[in-house]
Image (cartoon, rainbow, N blue to C red):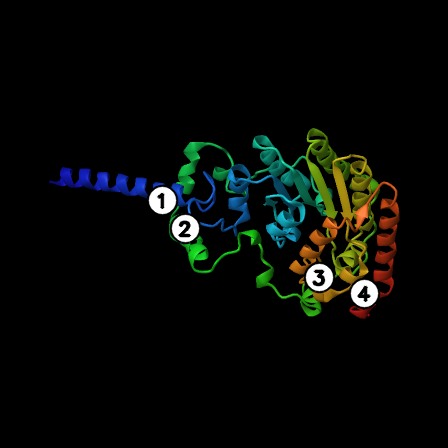
Amino acid sequence: MYRKFLKNFAAVSVILLILAAGLVVLFDPFFHYHEPVGPLKAVLTKKEYQSIGTIRNFSYDSLIMGSSTAENFNNRWFDDAFGVTAVKAIKSSGVTAQLDYYMEQAFESRKIKMVFYSLDLFALGGDPDIEFPDESMPLYLYDRNPFTDVNYVLNKDVIFEDIPYMLAETFLDDYDEGTSYNWAQYKTFSKEEALSHYDRPEEIAPMKAEEEYKEFVDGNVELLVKRVEQHPDTMFYFFYPPYSMLWWDNMYRSGELEQVMYAAGTSAERLLGYENVRMYYFQNDRDIILDLDQYMDPVHFTAEINQYMVEQMKEDNYRLTEENYREELDKMRKLAEEIREKEIKKYFP
């Protein structure tokens, strides 16, 4: 009888495990195997877990790329403005090499019509040789090894949290699929909020010498140039998002102003000569960056600004060219000087 009990217990256990795995494969909330099935929506709220599956398995022809400054775009803004079907490839605080991995994965299996790339200056200062994905990511979703999928298909959090959440967002909350990874609705944007998240350096650090950053910046720009050259039929829209005056004050006081100006200048200089590149510069718009009510911290702005950038790129405003990019960057440098000499004193006398 004891042996029979063990056999029955083992059989039931195996059946339950198979059913659990089948449930995960069917609903697939991380989209590791397929797009949403039937009426299920692409509920995208965990970029570290879902970006790679989205890139590999969804039906799309264009990419929206960047760090957290790009998360509050609605995909449909690009779809409607440019006649594409876009998905996001996002890495919070992502450096260029990490985003390049996502781009490589996208190009691997499909033709990409357009890439909308939020070109963060801090990302251009990251290590261009960094390994990604790394141990900070759920590697079982990235490695294409079916044996490590056990970490996904028999994951109790996926079964009891992620699948029910996917169902609730689909059928109860009417989730907008265009708002993938959007966090703006949970944040407060105001002058008080932005200032409360700015830890201003007490001392002004010496400005970094060129040799301290040039190699990294040049290496990252080379990664972008390589992708542009490899895919001449893809139109690349690179745009520089508008950081607040607090960020620019911090760049000066932390000794990094020359680094970020070099990053902007070098990336524009190297990329503007390609026919499949369009570049747009929003950083020297004083109406945006001096208005702290548009920010929740020195870097992150409202979704309205995200939408504004899409609309302006569609109209070809804020466009950088080989003829005007130096002038636009000079405007930014002068505005940065005005910020530290005048504007910042309104908040830090």
Q: In this picture, is 45 found above or below 6?
A: below
Say the numbered circle drawn on residue 23: 1
Residue 162's spot in the image, x, y percent?
A: 43, 51
Of badges 3 and 1, nearer the viewer stands 1
Q: Which residue is mark 3?
A: 199
Q: CA distance from mark 4 to mark 1?
A: 55 Å
Q: CA distance from mark 4 to mark 2?
A: 48 Å
Decide which of tag 2 and tag 1 comes sooner along the chain: 1
Q: Quadrant of residue 302?
A: bottom right
Decide which of tag 4 and tag 1 comes sooner along the chain: 1
Decide which of tag 3 and tag 2 comes sooner along the chain: 2
Q: CA distance from mark 3 to mark 1?
A: 47 Å
Residue 17's spot in the image, x, y percent?
A: 31, 41
Q: Is residue 155 left or right of residue 252?
A: left
Q: CA distance from mark 2 to mark 1?
A: 9 Å
Residue 255's spot in the image, x, y percent?
A: 80, 51
Decide which of tag 3 and tag 1 comes sooner along the chain: 1
Quarter containing the N terminus? top left
Dot 4 crowding, Cα within 10 Å, few <14, some 14–19, many 20+ = some
Amino acid at pointer 3: Asp
Amino acid at pointer 4: Ile
Say the numbered circle drawn on residue 344: 4
Amino acid at pointer 1: Leu
Of badges 3 and 2, nearer the viewer stands 2
